Amino acid sequence: MQNSKPDTNGAANSAGNGVAMEERIQPSRSFTDEEFERYSRQMIVPGMGKEGQLRLINSRVLIIGAGGLGCPAAQYIAGAGVGTIGVVDGDVVELSNLHRQVGHATSRIGMKKVDSLITHLRRLNPLPTFVPHASHIDPQNAADIVSQYDVVVDCTDNPATRYLISDVCVLLCKPLVSAASVQKSGQLIVLNCPPTPKGLLDRKYAPCYRCCFKKPPPAGAMLSCGEAGIMGPVVGMMGVAQAGEAIKIIASALHLPPSDPDSAPERNLQQPTLLLYSYDLESAVGPYTFRALKMAGRKKTCFACGENSTLTLDGIKAGNPNYEQFCGLAAPRSNLPPEERITAAAYHAAKTRGELPEHVLVDTREKEHFSFGNIDGAVNVPFGKLLMTAAAVKRGGASADQILAPAELEPLPEDAPIFVVCRRGLDSQEAVEKLKELGMDNGGKRKILDIVGGMKAWKEEVDHSFPFI
Amino acid sequence: MASTTETTETPALAITVDFSGGLEMLFSDQKRHSLSIPATDSHGKPATIASLIDYLCKNTMKDPRAELFVLDDHIRPGILVLINDADWELEGEETYEIQAGDNILFVSTLHGG
């Protein structure tokens, strides 16, 4: 598995023209007929040439995440002829992946993503060595995996993993091509390139992920593709751009540590840049579709690469830092007492038996989610709107009844219960608290209940054919 | 000179403020806001990014979930601030004095993929 590229017949070619350590390149190696033809169109591009192609063939790239970013990134990295391509992912292919994860296939649903993607890549180009790592990257395995490669492409989907990958790349001196995408936006940045050991300080040294994104957003403020949705071309664009950056790094030998660290700034006169892609569904390409934002260099105070960094590979393995905690993934949300909650199954059973009095069922999902299916009689009050009206009520600019919006709704008897359902059962708990706070419970005469687990539970417990998104 | 019928004597600064990465959701789903903000803050000091943030919360944000934008009077973690397309760290962060015509961009960092 490791070091699958044989360092055949030595002649390690020490130093030469500024860039040393091209130990894996065999300058005398000639291309096979197939390589010559396969890569001809990119080899004739000015700046690429035979040398650039040889560097690609002799390089090892790790793609972490075989999803919406990883699929397009891997395609172009494989197509370009990178010699060893590792893919890390612990998931299996699902139908809802396929609109954007173009390296998989309908016929491979249920297959491990790493195997599915490698199947696809081999059909595109059988020449590279493909290495599947069929588990999620974690503090225990990260260094072992990353150390086998020259360049890391972060195609993962959560902040804890992003900080972990960056930290390991800092410690192992690997350039990192990082991108992310949710809904209608994408971001891309090249980090730690050219790599310089941590603690070396000069603003000209390249930043790491922590230099640019010091702290993660609070857990409640984060959007995932599963919840917020994602447009295929948006994430695809970012993944393709990642491949482009990885290829540039290798072709220009920026992945190889310089013989003299002092020369690093000269090799990296590029301004660290965050590329932003905004995809507006209501307009054509405009001046702000792409923005190139100037970022600062390595930070003196950076936790990972700064002057007082205490980060070590052993520490990471031992759980220090604690990435989950840092990203607030253990943060508790509101917990209602049991008498203010009802399971989806119990609500449905009571309703079918006719045991429920006149009541209102409020569905707080976004209107797009609601439009695909909802419980009979449910009223859609998106969570954001509910909070907004609640704030207006508090300011005295609206009456509490307006929260349950639709004017056509008959005024309810003051003891008619309100049930609240959301997508997975978190927003609804907060909504229940909000409604009580506003006195909608009429001093306890009216019950306000949360349907446990939201529409996800409804699908699991009541209606298996419900189109849950 | 200041003999207009305006009620305030504070001169205003015309700037554009952009929101991206989902933050626009807190600002009427509008990505670009052309604003005219007071050139000085309540203490008579020149307007800074800090006073702009305060202004945005009081005047521009319609969504009550202010905690998705500010936390303890500072911009919340996970939001980048860019002054004329450069990281605010290169410009003095919250203390940067806003100039007429500036473009201030607030971007929420993304993690999906």
Image (spheres, rainbow, N blue to C red):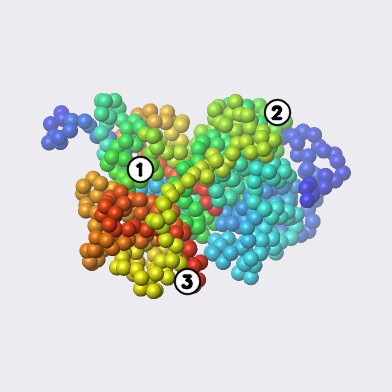
Q: How far apart are marks 3 and 1 (CA)?
A: 37 Å
Marked residue nearer the N-terminal end (3 or 2): 2
From the viewer's perspective, tell me whether residue B17 is left or right of residue A116: left
Disc 1 marks a residue whose amino acid type is Ala
Residue, disc 1? B66
Q: Residue A260 carries which label?
A: 2
> Which type of secondary structure does the marked residue at label 1 adopt?
helix
Spot occupied by residue B17 in the image (x, y as percentages of width and height): 35, 42
Discs 2 and 1 share one subunit: no
Residue A137 location (% of width, % of height) = 65, 48
In depth, the one of A377 and A335 nearer the eye is: A335
Q: Residue A463 carries which label?
A: 3
Residue B88 visible in the shown view: yes
Q: Can residue A376 be seen in this view?
A: no
Q: Residue at x 52, y 45 (%)?
A: A329
Q: Is residue B77 left or right of residue B26?
A: right
- A449 relative to A12, above or below: below
Residue at the extreme bottom of the image, as rendered: A353
Q: Which of marks 2 and 1 is in front?
A: 1
| Mark pair 3, 2: CA separation | 65 Å
- Taking the spot 24% from the left edge, 49% from the top edge, the residue there is A393
Residue A452's x, y, as percent? 44, 59
Q: Chain letter of disc 2? A: A
Q: Which amino acid does label 2 sit on?
A: Asp
